[in-house]
Image (spheres, helix red, strand yellow):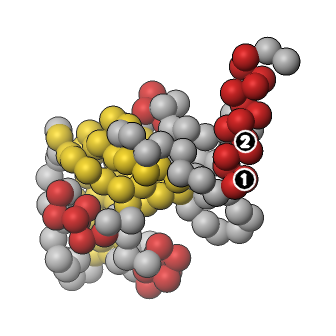
Amino acid sequence: MNMRATVSAVLTALLFAGECMADSGLALSGRFEYRTDPTSLEMLGGLVCFYPSAESAQLLPRAQTDKRLAWFCFTNDMESKKLLDIPREAKEGSCGYRGEAAVQVTKYTPHAGEGDGFDTAILQAVSNISQPRTLPCE
């Protein structure tokens, strides 16, 4: 078995074991979103989520066979809202906020199960942040 196949097999095994894949930090750039519409609140529990750029998405420790869109939510919700300068309440007529930032995360954990789960990470630091803009309701 070649080295690439061995690494891929180990990565896949860890994914299915539900283990944290990136204890140490990952530096990523992309878009963050905090959605306040009822459907998003039910699915995401009020967490801020991050959609890495195509280049940053390649840094995520996911199995090569994982073809899902690369995105994850921050489990430290109060701290992530503070670091990303997200207002406490959405403006009337809007359904949340979005912006761009470079982030440092730890404990990136891919969702290994079936269904509507999502990957998670802990937000540690933020730089190059844009002012959060309101999200329209759909």
Is there a contact, CB below 8 Å, between mark 2 and mark 1?
yes
Q: Looking at the picture, how far across and down is residue 50, in whole percent?
A: 39, 52
Residue for point 16% across, 64% down: 82
Q: Which residue is mark 1?
A: 16
Q: Residue furthest top?
A: 2
Q: Answer whether residue 51 is visible to the viewer in this image.
A: no
Please tell me which residue is depicted at 29% across the width and 58% down the height of the picture: 98
107 and 80: which is toward the camera: 107
Q: Is residue 78 above or below residue 12?
A: below
Is 133 situated left or right of 54 in this image?
left
- Which residue is at 61% across, 40% downward? 62
- Residue 9 vs 42, above or below: the answer is above
Three-letter amino acid code at the position of disc 2: Thr
Q: Mark 2 to mark 1: distance in Å? A: 6 Å
Specify whether residue 130 is in view.
yes
Seen in the picture, residue 138 relative to 106 is either above or below; the reply is below
Which part of the image, by quadrant, shows the C terminus? bottom left
Residue under label 2: 12
What percent of the width, then of the height, locates residue 29?
33, 37
For residue 101, what is the image quadrant?
top left
Quarter of the N terminus within the rendering = top right
Relative image position of residue 27 (x, y in whole percent): 33, 35
> With 97 as the anchor, is 115 left or right in this view?
right
Rendered location of residue 107, percent (x, y) = 43, 51
